[in-house]
Image (cartoon, helix red, strand yellow):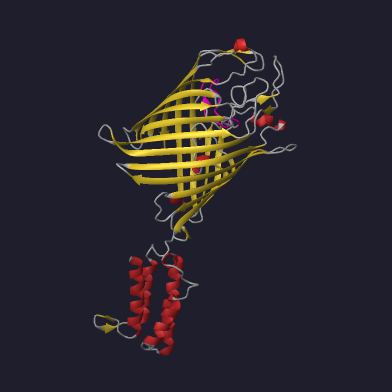
């Protein structure tokens, strides 16, 4: 509104000055002077873009030049001539299309206003209690003793606004470079230095960030990421299905549509991604293709309800190539305690299995609802329910051990509370049931002693000690669904307990 008032005043002063009706202290004022004064005021207004200021300045100068051409004393341009000139300038559709084009906001941010530096440091104590004896599928035996460990994770990153529609970012983290699922630096290695590596480096482009794309009456936006970035910035995925520590490499895009006056949907989002896993000189490369359709809706009914539903397909292409073994088999969890491997002869010193039993083409379903309306301890606290189901459409039967196909899994999580400021808390319970090839352990989480092929529970608590400091505890227990031991007498239920206590400081 203020911008339109400025525009009206500008036209008015030009009209009044040209017809000799502009007065200051009852004396006529030259139009050129009026124009110059008004242009100075417009140039000082940060809400008007530089392009618009230049256009207004040129327009005023053309009027002044017309004044000088027709009269050296007074502005001798007729009202009709002036009206024609103003009409030509403002009705030129090639120059001005919308009010936003005319009065767009000029981004005048400095380098430090564009730069956002962030990070966190986490101290973790972890205790594992094993109540079994393990005979691995390769024939040797090992005792799994109870173990306590301390570790630290440090992350430091930045995000820089190149322009209102483009950003670049990067982040470094502790942890070994070849451990995809963890950024932990463990204590107790003779005080040696900790490794740190780059785990994010990306370009984000959102072409309709400042001005939404219009599709009929509906608004739309597009977000694109190129490089190494966080998968969950676009895709909905639970804590076990895709670990937040895993940063894929490739290209991802998310198209958002906001339906106008739709009773059933607030947002429809289509996400597509292509990730490189391994690049091989002599064999086919391993890659992943992902597509997800995401729906969101919020409504009021005795409180606020938020719903998120998503269906996705993950195709991990050609991860079974023999030469890929050096990079995939040795990833955390991709061994006999998780995804099934074939060509696994018994006996000490036997060669390492060469291929996964199954291909990994995963159908993933995600449903989450959050209700904010329960008052507990004099405060309204949200309750969140998450259900997740996954099916490996290309799971294959394990001929060696007769387990049959093992490609289905699901989890249910229930949380109460939220973390926003000092004194806030959140508690949760989770139940997990994943068959061996229902998750791909290159990307699944490490909260449990296994990354798939288990049934388990967890109890999760958070307490905000200070505004940027959180105490987190996680207690989980479970057992493997199938045992890969070659001898029936050596099998056990493999019940395990794990306790984590973490202190997290964000900055």
Above-or-below relation of 74 to 93: below
Q: Nearer the viewer, residue 258 or 444?
A: 258
Is 155 left or right of 356, judged from the image as shown?
Answer: left
Q: Residue at x 39, y 51 (%)?
A: 263
Extreme-right residue of the structure: 282
Q: Is residue 37 visible?
A: no
Q: Position of residue 323 (x, y in %)?
A: 72, 32
Q: Is 62 in the magenta?
A: no
Counting from the top left corner in percent of width and height, residue 489 is at 61, 10
- Where, by quadrant of the figure, is residue 288 drawn? top right
Q: Main secondary structure of the magenta part?
A: loop
Residue 284 appears in the rendering: yes
Tally of numbered discs: 0
Q: Where is residue 77 drawn, in percent x and y?
A: 39, 87
Query: In the picture shown, does residue 35 fall above or below 206?
Result: below
Vertical side of 232 occupied by 47: above or below: below
- In reply to whether residue 190 is colored magenta, the answer given is yes
* Magenta region, residue range: 178-194
Nearer to the camera, 500 or 116: 500
Q: Position of residue 205 (x, y in %)?
A: 53, 52
Image quarter hosting the C terminus: top left
Specify the farthest residue to the top: 489
| Picture quarter with the N terminus | bottom left
| 467 is higher (above) or lower (below) than 330 | below
Please indicate whether residue 352 sits to the left or right of residue 251 in the image: right
């Amino acid at each position: 509104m203020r911008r339109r008032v400025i525009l009206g005043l500008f036209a008015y002063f030009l009209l009044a000055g040209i017809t000799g009706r502009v007065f200051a202290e009852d004396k006529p004022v030259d139009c050129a002077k009026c124009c110059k004064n008004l242009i100075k005021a417009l140039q000082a207004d940060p809400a008007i873009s530089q392009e618009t200021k230049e256009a207004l300045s040129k327009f005023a100068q053309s009027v002044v030049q017309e004044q000088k051409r027709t009269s050296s004393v007074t502005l001798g341009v007729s009202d009709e001539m002036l009206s024609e000139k103003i009409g030509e300038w403002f009705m030129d559709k090639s120059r001005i299309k919308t009010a936003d084009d005319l009065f767009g906001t000029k981004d005048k941010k400095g380098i430090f206003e564009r730069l956002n530096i962030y990070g966190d440091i986490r101290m973790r104590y972890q205790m594992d209690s094993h109540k079994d004896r393990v005979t691995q599928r390769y024939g040797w035996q090992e005792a799994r003793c109870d173990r306590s460990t301390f570790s630290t994770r440090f992350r430091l990153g930045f995000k820089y606004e190149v322009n209102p529609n483009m950003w670049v970012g990067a982040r470094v983290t502790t942890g070994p470079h070849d451990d995809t699922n963890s950024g932990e630096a463990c204590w107790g290695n003779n005080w040696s230095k900790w490794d740190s590596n780059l785990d994010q480096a990306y370009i984000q482009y959102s072409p309709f960030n400042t001005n939404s794309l219009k599709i009929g009456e509906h608004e739309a936006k597009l977000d694109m990421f190129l490089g190494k970035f966080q998968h969950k910035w676009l895709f909905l995925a639970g804590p076990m299905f895709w670990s937040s520590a895993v940063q894929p490499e490739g290209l991802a895009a998310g198209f958002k549509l906001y339906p106008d006056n739709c009773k059933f949907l607030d947002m429809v989002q289509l996400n597509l991604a292509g990730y490189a896993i391994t690049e091989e000189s002599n064999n086919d490369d391993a890659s992943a293709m992902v597509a997800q359709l995401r729906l969101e809706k919020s409504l009021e009914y005795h409180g606020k309800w938020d719903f998120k539903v998503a269906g996705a397909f993950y195709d991990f292409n050609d991860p079974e190539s023999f030469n890929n073994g050096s990079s995939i088999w040795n990833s955390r969890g991709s061994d006999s305690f998780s995804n099934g491997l074939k060509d696994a002869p018994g006996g000490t010193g036997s060669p390492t299995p060469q291929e996964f039993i199954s291909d990994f083409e995963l159908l993933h379903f995600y449903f989450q609802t959050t209700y904010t309306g329960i008052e507990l301890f004099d405060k309204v606290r949200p309750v969140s329910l998450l259900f997740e189901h996954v099916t490996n459409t290309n799971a294959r039967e394990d001929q060696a051990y007769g387990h049959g196909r093992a490609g289905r899994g699901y989890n249910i999580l229930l949380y109460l509370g939220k973390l926003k400021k000092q004194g806030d808390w959140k508690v949760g319970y989770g139940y997990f049931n994943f068959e061996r090839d229902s998750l791909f352990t290159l990307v699944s989480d490490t909260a449990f002693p296994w990354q798939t092929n288990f049934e388990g529970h967890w109890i999760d608590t958070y307490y905000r000690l200070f505004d940027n400091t959180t105490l987190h505890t996680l207690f989980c227990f479970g057992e493997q669904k199938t045992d890969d031991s070659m001898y029936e007498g050596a099998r056990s239920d493999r019940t395990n307990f794990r306790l984590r206590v973490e202190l997290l400081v964000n900055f």
